[in-house]
Image: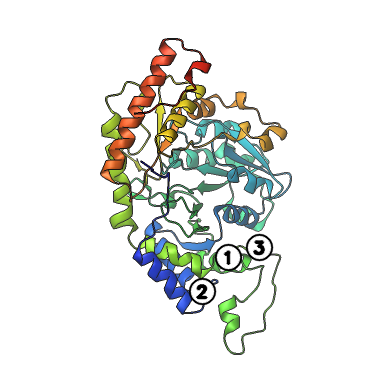
Amino acid sequence: MNIPFSPPYIDQAVIDQVLDALKNKWITTGPKVKALEQEILELTETDATICVNSWTSGAILMLKWFGVKPGDEVIVPAYTYCATALSVLHCGAKPIMVDVLDDFTIDPEKVREAITPKTKAIIAVDFAGWPCNYDLLKSVIESPKVRKLFKPQTDKQATLGRVLLIADAAHSIGSTYQGKPAAKKCDITIFSFHAVKNITTAEGGCICLNLPAAFNAQEEYNYLKIYTLNGQNKDALTRAKSGGWRYDILFEGLKINMPDICAAIGLAQIKKYVQTLLPARKLIANEYLNGFKDQEWFMAPSLVDSERESCYHLFPLRIKGLTEFHRDRVIDDLTALGIAVNVHFIPMPMLTCFKKLGYEMKDYPMAYRNYSNEISLPIYPQLTKTEIRFIIASLIKVVNIQVNSMQNGMVESEMLIPVRL
């Protein structure tokens, strides 16, 4: 069997939307992007949405919008994809890494301990579709002691009057918190529409604004749209109209707009997301839960509780007691059986770029513990029941072999023979 990890969902509706963009002969930012922004606005119930060409560019934009600069600090979890910290570095600021909780999300108490007068923002990462504990994070940044530490240096910072809370929601479009869209829990929420995400535009992302009333959402939207186009006061569609050629550059912007040809893919998907695509993911997650529940080694991922529900972007199971070496053997054996799996993530302090900057894995014990025995299984609407059953049976078999080998004290060199069912 050949089961890919996360193929994009491309049906006839997606093809039709893309063909429509091509037939209209307008493929850069235009009506498709505007329509996608409106769909996201309705899904998230936020105040404004700005589509961009990636999560990373969206994060850089919002940090710059807030005035984050060299000498500033931004708190991030050690357990995330590198883009979270790279966006901070690209602004010249310093990422302050903190450890995570058992559910993979940033530890609010570690955040509290890390805040200094240099702290300008926190980027909290929703993991696998599971939202962070935003109520606890907000209680930290809104506490009198932390507010007193905050030193505003720009008009935006003075207007907010506290540390900015950004949700790295690359995994979590459609997640809920207390029965409402999780995107409403932060000042800024940024989604990714990369090819493997629940909704894709091939490459792309979206910024959602949920700022306090002191900010005018429409004015911020207008400003940020200009920012995504090099600070230019007219987009290409406006300039293409008769007599619209003259433009001005208002400030040093970025070139990070999303094109219509990409937005068309996401537009077709989001129209059926709540009713079709998201329930299909949830169904597969429940199949996995039922399939593994009797295994003593199975550590179920956080998917739903009394306040939060995942959007089932990943199914990140952990295997109790398994070492990183034996976890890797499980992955090799599954790959040999034709099942593509993944690991989310390699903690940033384990990566060369961040090692060179002085981050050390020993400072983040929970992040390493979570990483060492995590395996992300395929979860997407196109998976068939036959494939799901095969994944469950295969994982149980290969994990039990590894667990038994650990119990029997087999040496690593004896474990290099791939497993066949």
Which residue corresponds to mark 3?
254
- Marks 2 and 3, how far apart at CA: 18 Å
Please rate how many residues cluster around mark 2, counting C-alpha atoms within 10 Å: few if below 14, some from 14 to 19, many from 20: some
Q: Nearer the viewer, residue 194 or 399?
A: 399
Q: Residue at x 56, y 78 (%)?
A: 237
Q: Position of residue 297 (x, y in %)?
A: 36, 22
Q: Quadrant of residue 163?
A: top right
Is 417 left or right of 73, judged from the image as shown? Answer: left
Quadrant of the image containing the C terminus? top left
In this picture, is 109 found above or below 86? above
The amino acid at mark 1 is: Asn
Q: Residue at x 70, y 67 (%)?
A: 251
In this picture, is 127 found above or below 271? above
Q: Quadrant of residue 75?
A: top right
Is 289 left or right of 93, judged from the image as shown? Answer: left
- Marks 1 and 2, how far apart at CA: 10 Å
The disc placed on residue 133 is none
Q: Position of residue 321 (x, y in %)?
A: 43, 19
The amino acid at mark 3 is: Leu
Q: Position of residue 338 (x, y in %)?
A: 40, 38
Secondary structure beneath dot 1 equals: loop
- Marks 3 and 1, how far apart at CA: 9 Å
Q: Nearer the viewer, residue 133 or 340?
A: 340
In this picture, is 141 found above or below 413? below
Mark toward the start of the polypeptide (1 vs 2):
2
Please rate how many residues cluster around mark 1, counting C-alpha atoms within 10 Å: few if below 14, some from 14 to 19, many from 20: many
Which residue corresponds to mark 2?
30
Which residue corresponds to mark 1?
257
The amino acid at mark 2 is: Gly
Q: Residue at x 71, y 31 (%)?
A: 358
